[in-house]
Image (tube, rainbow, N blue to C red):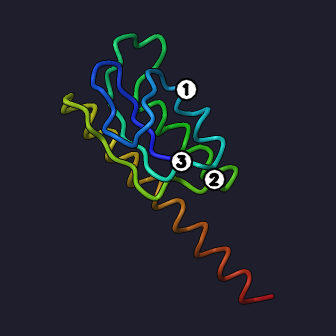
Amino acid sequence: MKVYLDDERAAPEGWVRVLWPDEAIELLQTGAVTQLSLDHDLGDDQRGTGYDVLLWIEQEVALHKLVPPAVIKVHSANPAGRKRMLAAIEAIYRIYRIYISSATHNDAVK
């Protein structure tokens, strides 16, 4: 499943559009999300931003070994938000690579 988080733009064909971080997280929890495209500013900071979705993914990868979507993109026009989100994506994949490397090493030792 391809998930597109944005409060203003229409989702590209073949993508599921969600408006709020909690909706994106709910879909991520199914394990069926293969691609994720995030906007930062969603019109109501009380409900969260695209960055909040990335913080959730990072925590789940680190603590619960969540497999992140194969592709995570940012389509935000907010330069500062975009930069922060790209750094979070790098962290997510870095943590995941460490987990995979560790799991592979542990399997080899057994």
Q: Quadrant of residue 110?
A: bottom right
Q: Quadrant of residue 50?
A: top left
Q: Residue visible at 19% across and 30% down?
A: 77
Q: Residue visible at 26% across and 37% down?
A: 75
The residue identified by callout 2 is 66
Does residue 95 sit above or below 10 in this rendering?
below
Foreground residue, 50 or 30? 30
Instruction: Point out which mark residue 33 bears.
Output: 3
> Where residue 51 sits in the image (x, y, percent)?
41, 32
For discs 2 and 3, the disc positioned in front in the rendered view = 3
> Where residue 10 sits in the image (x, y, percent)?
30, 27
- Report whether 90 appears left or right of 9: right
Does residue 30 sit above or below 71 in this rendering?
above
- Mark 2 or mark 3, earlier in chain: 3
- Report whether 58 appears left or right of 107: left
Query: At label 2, which amino acid type do we have?
Result: Leu
The residue identified by callout 1 is 23
Q: Are marks 2 and 3 in contact (CB under 8 Å)?
A: no
SS under mark 1 = helix
Foreground residue, 92 or 32? 32
- Mark 3 or mark 1, earlier in chain: 1
